[in-house]
DNA sequence: AATAAGTACCTGTACGATACAGCTATCTGA
DNA sequence: TCAGATAGCTGTATCGTACAGGTACTTATT
């Protein structure tokens, strides 16, 4: 509708984002119960970030993921217990520990990522390639806007 | 990029959705601590759904919101404690209770909704109206795809 | 009509993710 | 050198959620 009030479009965006989050949560819960009991919540994000940005210490992870340090500490402990990451002393800072993904961790992460990608492929099976890349681009811009708003510091 | 592998676009969508959820959570937490300690999590969604779809019982809410009945029961109790909804016996079913939003509840919900919409307005201030409505439309389609996938029953 | 099966809601309990406060070990700058 | 900052860990609390079980009511079966 080209005569949309902006209000209405913004409201719709707000609605859709809220809905998307509800579904995302529900989906993760549902898939979490199955044999996919593989990577819960932040664990996936942590591994992903490690894979993307390389080994780094807990504080860097916490800052980047918008989580408290203690939360990351515990997540990392769980990941270590499961052999998905390793902690090594930071050679340049005796206080720090560098978190590195293990091959198993990377593999597990990649598997989850592939499964999710496949899921999106299924869901968006009837979308045109243009619509898909438009969605990807706009979501990217939306996230950037979120980042800019949360971190003007 | 027109030569994108589909993989890559889907992967990007997956990434962006994951990011969006992280940010959404973080934002809700952050705003929750302030004087905005107004409507937490599902409470907003419940009130919203009541406003949209009219008074209904706990089971209907739970089914619609993809939540366990006990969860909704507790959320509803909290909302009742805060005077945002009322419970009345279902006249047509002695087991049921009909949940209705109170004026205060509707007002509170509308305030939160307006605040959120304003937030999006801020964040998307430099977006063209076309991009905004495209985002809204594509998010809508994405959610529809999610619904279709979760509810083929 | 009597009773079995199903349903709606509530309560007890448990769990996972998270935050905050406080601790110790280490680093850094005056 | 030492005072303050920082990295990470641990204790504790909270919140949202699920599952299991209980009670009251409804629906279906005979």
Image (cartoon, coloured by chain):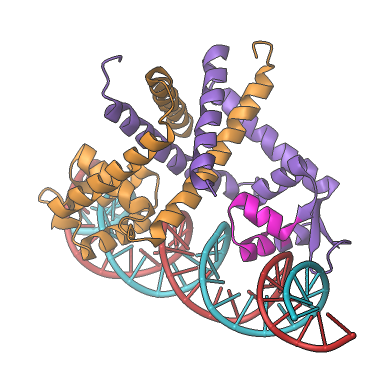
Chain colours: A orange, B purple, C red, D cyan
Quarter of the rendering occupied by the N terminus of chain A: top right
Residue B67 vertical position relative to residue B1 in the rendered view, above or below: below
- Tell me the quarter of the picture where residue A52 sits: top left
Q: Which residue lies furthest to the left in this view?
A: A91
Residue A63: image location, x then y, percent: 34, 44
- Residue B87 appears in the figure: yes
Quarter of the rendering occupied by the C terminus of chain A: top left
Q: Nearer the viewer, residue C29 or B57?
A: B57
Residue B39: image location, x then y, percent: 66, 49
Q: Does the magenta stretch include residue A74?
A: no
**Image position of C10 (left or right of A112):** right
- Tell me the quarter of the picture where residue A124 sits: top left
Q: Nearer the viewer, residue B83 or A90?
A: B83
Residue A81 vertical position relative to residue A87 in the rendered view, above or below: below
Residue B71 vertical position relative to residue B109 in the rendered view, above or below: below
Residue in the picture at 69% in, 33% down: B114
**Image position of B96 (left or right of B74):** right
The magenta stretch is: B57-76
- Residue A102 appears in the figure: no
Q: Main secondary structure of the magenta part?
A: helix
Residue in the picture at 40% in, 22% down: A137
Q: Which of C30 and A41 is in front in this view?
A: A41
Q: Does the magenta stretch include residue B70?
A: yes
Q: How many marks?
A: 0
Residue B121: image location, x then y, percent: 60, 24
Residue in the picture at 18% in, 41% down: A54
């Amino acid at each position: 509708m080209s005569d949309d009030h902006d209000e209405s479009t913004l409201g719709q965006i707000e609605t859709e984002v809220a809905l998307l989050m509800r579904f995302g949560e529900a989906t993760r819960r549902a898939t979490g119960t199955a044999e996919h009991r593989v990577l819960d919540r932040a664990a996936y994000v942590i591994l992903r970030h490690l894979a993307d940005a390389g080994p780094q210490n807990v504080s860097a992870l916490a800052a980047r993921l918008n989580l408290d340090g203690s939360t990351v500490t515990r997540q990392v402990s769980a990941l270590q217990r499961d052999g998905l990451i390793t902690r090594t002393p930071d050679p340049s800072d005796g206080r720090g520990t560098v978190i590195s993904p293990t091959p198993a961790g990377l593999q597990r992460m990649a598997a989850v990522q592939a499964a999710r990608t496949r899921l999106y492929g299924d869901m968006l099976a009837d979308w045109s390639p243009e619509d898909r890349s438009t969605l990807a681009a706009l979501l990217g811009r939306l996230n950037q806007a979120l980042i800019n708003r949360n971190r003007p510091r």
